Image (cartoon, helix red, strand yellow):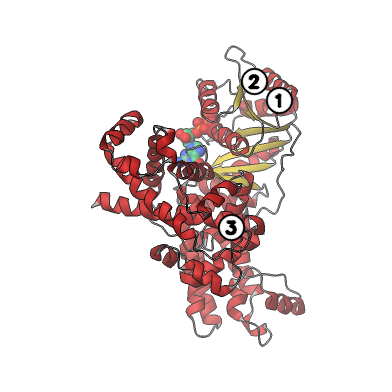
Amino acid sequence: MVLTELGSSLANALAKINRAPKIDDKILQILIADIERALLGADVSTKLVEKLKGNIREKLRLSELPAGVDVKRVIEKVECAQYKVAIQTKKQKGITVIKEITSLLDSERVAYVPRRGKSNVIMFVGLQGSGKTTTCTKLGYYYRVRGWKVGLVCCDTFRAGAFDQLEQNAIKAKIHFYGDRVETDPVKIALEGVKRFKEKKFEIIIVDTSGRHKQEESLFEEMEMIAHAVKPDDTILVVDSTNGQQLEAQAEAFRKRVDVASVIVTKLDGHAKGGGALSAVAATKAPIVFIGVGEHFNELQKFDTQRFVNRILGRGDIATIVEDMKEQKLDDQKELLEKMKKGIFTLRMMRDQFQNILKMGSFGSMMQMIPGLNNLPKESEEASQQRLQNFLVIMDSMTAEELDGDISLIETNPARQRRICRGAGVHINFIRELVMVYKPFAGFAKNMKKMPFGKNGEMPKNPNQMAKMANFLPENVLRQIGGQAGFMNLMQKFQSAEAGTALQSMQNMQSRMKGMQQMAKSQRRNRR
Ligand SMILES: Nc1nc2c(ncn2[C@@H]2O[C@H](COP(=O)(O)OP(=O)(O)OP(=O)(O)O)[C@@H](O)[C@H]2O)c(=O)[nH]1
């Protein structure tokens, strides 16, 4: 994501503060200038950047801070207890540099949250090509994998091919679909679709409406009529981030005509205007609920300003990973854990883990959430995902005996290898690579027997035990997460994010890191 570049420029600017022996006004001016350059480079409007600079200058008066306050922490930390005392005495609001950056992207309005056991009707609106139809499926998929009953209604009678596109997407994403090829009145289709899904107690009913090339009166009239007919609980505007700052006017125009409750910004996976797009939408005070970061169904990320800023600044977002695992019930892996503790790790178990990784989203987005791993080389992301898909296809062509038995069954039998690869339609090299990826996982499981887990399998809290645990990680993975100190910090974050699932989460992460390390290695080898 290009926003990662904005994040690293901002993180570099903040790092200068940490390196400076003394913080004075001159250093602060340099910081402000660096931040200005980074934000303008990401297309954030000059008006907003000027406001941000003014706020920092006005609210961060170094000379007025009481003695004893840690200035570096004041500048950098989002929450700083000492500074809170300082600001109370000065009657200022809790403003720090990061808070200011966060507020650029924060609409401060709370979005609609669907309720379980009720039919939540969500209407999508937006210009043609904004990614509306794709995003309807992505959102449907997002809820389906979290156990909601989802239905899609296609009311786009304007664009030929919209029906087929949504129907195909719905089939691929295993979501129920309603459309009518013959009916030309989108209002009738919307009413009928919503009625049918409500009768069958669907919980999420997504209504895709027509788009137009520009903001035409006919588009708005149609939107109003559909909204009037189905009375949506939530109306989501889909906007294309490549329009950058222009989105402020676009979002305002839609909001004047329908009650746009929230916004999804798409195509943030590779455009320099991402910062402009997000800040422009936030300026309209419509909350951004999700962002689209690719064309695949799972490339939709929940948007939470604070977590997003943490992530792009390289501070990771463990809370989202743990939440995703819980929501997708990926943390329910007691059986896996029990087996691994006995040193057992089969190909079937690896296949389940790989499926979990794919369910959680792309490698890139997951990596960006882990502190210290945010800077993995970009180019490996898509290739890694493809490799994972190939491995899954190979494992799907194996017999139960091969999936559950000893790896030597495959490793020492070329005829078996050829049969599996023929079934999977892949080159024989892939199965050799799969064996190479599998072996360290199995070795890791063997090591687990020696790890200092608590009586009930919980992660150690004692620092010495934690340090011991770190020794079981591969050296370069440990380096990437900031050595033993980084590992302990990560563990604490997992534990505080969700004490009950910390162990499973950590073990999942460890397995994934190891797998990714192997993949990166074999990619490097292939490139050579
Ligand atoms: N890279 C990237 N492409 C996306 C994203 N979201 C959608 N797209 C692509 O954008 C193009 C347009 O998406 P559609 O969903 O067809 O657009 P639409 O807004 O529904 O168009 P109409 O139905 O004509 O109104 C397609 O090629 C999508 O694959 C995203 O987050 N990232």
Is the residue marked by circle 2 packed among few (<14), some (14-19), or many (20+) residues within 10 Å? many
Mark 2: amino acid: Pro
Q: For numbered disc 3, what is the local secondary structure?
A: helix
Is the residue marked by circle 1 packed among few (<14), some (14-19), or many (20+) residues within 10 Å? some
Instruction: Residue at 62%, 65% (x, y): give it.
Output: 100
Q: Do the residues bearing badges 1 and 2 touch, measured as CB atoms within 8 Å? A: yes
Q: For numbered disc 1, what is the local secondary structure?
A: helix
Residue 503: mark in rendering: 3
The residue that mark 1 highlights is: 225
Mark 1: amino acid: Met
Mark earlier in primary sequence (1, 3): 1
Q: For numbered disc 2, what is the local secondary structure?
A: helix
Q: CA distance from mark 1 to mark 2?
A: 9 Å
The residue that mark 2 highlights is: 186
Q: Nearer the viewer, residue 306 or 340?
A: 340
Q: CA distance from mark 2 to mark 3?
A: 50 Å
Horizontal side, residue 193 vs residue 417: left or right: right
Residue 284: mark in rendering: none
Mark 3: amino acid: Leu
